[in-house]
Every structure is written in C-alpha cells, then in structure tokens.
Image (cartoon, rainbow, N blue to C red):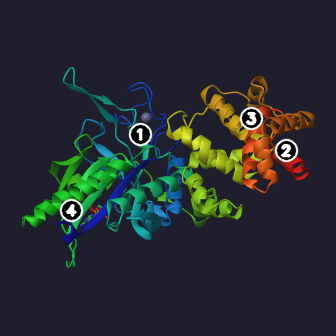
Amino acid sequence: MISDYIPVIGLEIHCELSTNSKVFCTCSAEFGGDRNTRCCPVCCGMPGTLPIINQTAVEYAVRAGYALNCGINKFSVFDRKNYFYPDLPKAYQISELNFPIVLAGEVPIEYEENGEKKKKSIRINHIHLEEDAGKLVHDDLNGVSLCDYNRCGVPLIEIVTEPDMRSPEEARKLVETIALQLQYAGVSDCKMEEGSIRADVNVSLMRKDATEFGTRAEIKNVNSLKSIYRTIEYEIKRQAQILDRGGEVVQETRRFDANKGETKAMRSKEDAHDYKYFPDPDILQVNFTDEDLERIKASLPEMPAQRRERYLSMGIPEKEAMVIVNDKVISDFFEDCMKVYNNPKSLVNFINGEIMRRINLGEIDKDAPKYTAAQVAHLVEMSETDKVSKNDAKTIFREMAEKGGDPEEIAKREGMIIVVDTTRVHEVIDAVFAANPGPVEQYKNGDKKVFGFIMGLCNKELRGSATPKVVKEELEKRLAAL
Ligand code: ADP
Ligand code: MG
Ligand code: ZN
C-alpha cells in the first residue's frame, strides 16, 4: 500500500538564462526564429572553431546562486560531457562537473497540503552552467526527424537539489518558488511553455521503518508544473505496486507521457563515467575576486520576500499581497500603476479583481495587454474619485482590454462622466417621494430598512448626474426633515 512508503524526491531543474547571445558565441539566444537561422560554426561545433565565454551568462549564473541562497565558487572549470545524439552536433556538451559555479544552498518553500499550511527548506546541492542542445523536429508525415540547431549553445543552468522532497506538492512548489526567484533576479523568464524551465524528476520509495533510501527512477525533461506533479504521483503508485509484490525498482531513465499520464522506461541509467568527462581545453577557468562577487550580489533587484514586506507595510492584506507578488508581470504592472496613482489598496482591488479575472478567462494576454499601467491607474482614480461609477469603470476597462484606449475618452464618449447636479438630485428625490408615499411613510414610522429601496430608485433615475455618495447625503437630509 502507498501509505507503507515515504516518497523521496530530488530534482534537477534546467533553466535557460535570458542573455541576448549564446553562452560561447555571439548568436542570438532568443526563443523562436526560422529553423537553423540562429546558429554559427561555433555553436554547431565545426572543427577549428573556438568558444568564447559570455560574461553575462556567468554573472547571471552567479545571480541565480545568490537568488537561491547558495554559496558561490570563486573558481570554476568547464568540462566536456561526451555523448552522441543528433541534437548535439559537437557530440559533447560543455558543462561543469567537479567545479561548478554555484555551491550548496537552501530554498525555503511555503505550501498548502490537505488544507494545512506548511513550511520547509529544500537543500540545493549545487548549480552548474552549461549549454543547451538543439531540438529534433519529428515529421511523422514523411517518417523523418529533422534537426533545428537554434537552441544549441543557449546558456542553461542546472539546479540540482538534495533528495529532500516528500510529496508531489513539495516538488511542484519548489519549482514554482525557484522560477519566481529567478524571474525576479532577472536571469530567466522561466516560461514553461517555451521550455525555458524543465526538470528531471528523481523518485524513490522507502518503507516507513527503513534507514536508507530506495532505488530511484529518473524521469527526464518534464516540462510543466502539472506534469511534474502527475509524474511523481504516477511513479509513487508504480513503485509501490512493484514493492508490494516483493519486486525491486530498477534504476533507470524514464519519460513521462502527458497524454496517458504514465511514465515509460527509456534506457538504463548512465553514470558520470559513461560521459567520459574531461576539462575543456579551449575555455578559460572562471576566477572571481571578492569585489566581483560583491558587485554581482549588489546588482540583485528587490526579491519577492522584500516586496511582500513592503506591500504589507503599505497596508495591503497578506492574501492580496501574495497574489500580486507571486506573479512578477502583475507585480511590476502594479508598481507602474503606483507611480501614476498612489493608492495601493484600490489598485490591488482592481488588479486582483477585474484584471486577474479577465486574464484567467483568457481575454487578456498578460505579457502584451492592450492597455498601459498609466491608463489603468487613471481609470482606478476616476472610479475612486466618483468621476465614473464602479460599474461603468468595469465597462470602460472591458473596452480597454479588448481594443485599447484612453479611459477618460471612452467615459466621455459613452456619457459616463458623472457631473453632480444638485438641483436635479432634489427634483428626483421629490418625484420618488411623490410616487412612493408608502415606503416614505414606513421610513417615517421608524422602519429604516426601506432607505436602501428609496435610494435605489433615486440612483436609477440619477445615473450619470450624481454619485451614490451625494444621493445618500441628500436623501438622508430630506428624510430627516420629514
Ligand atoms: P547522478 O549523478 O547519478 O545524476 P546525483 O547524486 O547527482 O546522481 O543525483 C541526481 C538527483 O537525484 C539529485 O536531485 C538527487 O537529489 C536525486 N536523488 C539521489 N538519490 C535519490 C533517491 N534515492 N531518491 C530520489 N532522488 C534521489
Ligand atoms: Mg543526473
Ligand atoms: Zn553560434
């Protein structure tokens, strides 16, 4: 039974660094482009070419190390990891084995499991810098596979954790936390859908009374948070069944089939010696001085934990603050709004409500919205200062989201700007009183509940020529004088 075992999970997380150029040549490292248009003799491994290391990639790796509370190695060495596969034209990958750029560290995670809030720290064993490989494009129609080398040589860091996780949720949360830290650090966009973050998932089971870890399976290249969760869930079930039968888990490399929700054996596991690693003679060792490291550390921008503190000190409730902080794009958007209209609570309400709702419905492309932060800030200000009603503000925003446009212009065109006309307010109140003697009488006799009903009638009539606040004040005055 699954409950007889403790799952043990370790991850090797690969993140592409968002440098402009590749790690050993000057080709563009950007995602996309026509096939094989972003490569050169260096990243395609032509004989006689020499790699030159990209300083920014090295600094990004160090920043990633600091963002994940790790130690930095002042001396690191690149190695050749030799293997043959068509997506690797050099037949070796430049990586780091014995002297990786980032040393051990620890990443705190906070998560909810079975309705309970939990906290834990996951240890990082090290982080190394390496190059990505190309991509195989399978053409099923013609029964061939083609190579696209655009991704060859894109800088990649591999974050290797200790086997500290004990559930799919812990693993999912760790990847999410690491992605957020790296996005804030400005070193990777960690877009799962573009493959810029993916993980090898190691899973084993141990009996509750065991003192040693069991044999693990390694599931390669799992590329979404959901798949990581499902992979682990499936592996736990699969291995528990084997162990229940008295069998033994085979140490092997597997892959996850997201359509079937299953993992399948690929090959028996390879060891480091299978790769015949040796130091790359073409690349200089990396040496840092204390000043270099101080400078890189100081270049880290505000990180999620600091931002959360600042938001709390602005009076934003914890839950709302976390929704914003946990999404860097949204958080940066909020920061831009604040520069135009300094009203954190109203902005957060609008962003977490109206904007998030439409993003989740797929109506807004979060990365390329049709509105600007300044326009949204202005809209929220118009709504807060009763220049437009709350309801109309939503209608205006809908148009901004769909087509773009200035909120003030939309409001004017649609006749939504509220101009308070006190004479008209009095006229409407008189008319409502005359038409509804019953409720007015009720109010006079002490039934204060009808106030809302009377006010509703007035508001309906006064739409656009008074704010609810003014109507309420005037109505209270009139009723008191009855
Ligand atoms: P290798 O060099 O063979 O890839 P490592 O010791 O570097 O092995 O570990 C690779 C990953 O596997 C690490 O993330 C580690 O935490 C994880 N791991 C190691 N042993 C186990 C185990 N018994 N169960 C689950 N994960 C494990
Ligand atoms: Mg490994
Ligand atoms: Zn190149």
Quadrant housing residue 291: bottom right
Is residue 273 visible to the viewer in this orientation of the structure?
Answer: no
Residue that lies at the very extreme toward the top in this rendered image: 142
Q: Which residue position holds label 3? A: 460
Label 3 within 8 A of ligand 1 by Cβ: no
Q: Which residue position holds label 2? A: 470
Q: Which is more foreground, mark 3 or mark 4? A: 3
- Locate residue 448 relative to residue 51 in the image: left or right: right
Which of the two discs, 1 and 3, labels the residue nearer the N terminus? 1
Q: Label 2: how many residues lie within 10 Å, few (<14), some (14-19) or many (20+)? A: some
Residue nearer the viewer, 464 or 264: 464
Element under label 3?
helix
Label 4 within 8 A of ligand 1 by Cβ: yes
Q: Which is more foreground, mark 2 or mark 3? A: 3
Element under label 4?
loop
Which of the two discs, 2 and 3, labels the residue nearer the N terminus? 3
Mark 3 residue type: Lys
- Where does residue 294 sit, x and y in percent of width and height? 61, 64
Which of the two discs, 4 and 2, labels the residue nearer the N terminus? 4
Q: Which residue position holds label 4? A: 216
Which of the two discs, 3 and 4, labels the residue nearer the N terminus? 4
> Residue 292 got which mark?
none
Mark 1 residue type: Glu
Which of the two discs, 2 and 1, labels the residue nearer the N terminus? 1
Mark 2 residue type: Val
Q: Which residue position holds label 1? A: 193
Mark 4 residue type: Arg
Q: Is residue 137 above or below residue 306?
A: above
Asked if the residue at tag 4 contacts the one at tag 3, i.e. Cβ–Cβ closer than 8 Å, the answer is no
Q: Is residue 464 above or below residue 277?
A: above
Q: Which is more foreground, mark 1 or mark 4? A: 1
Residue at 29% in and 55% down: 201
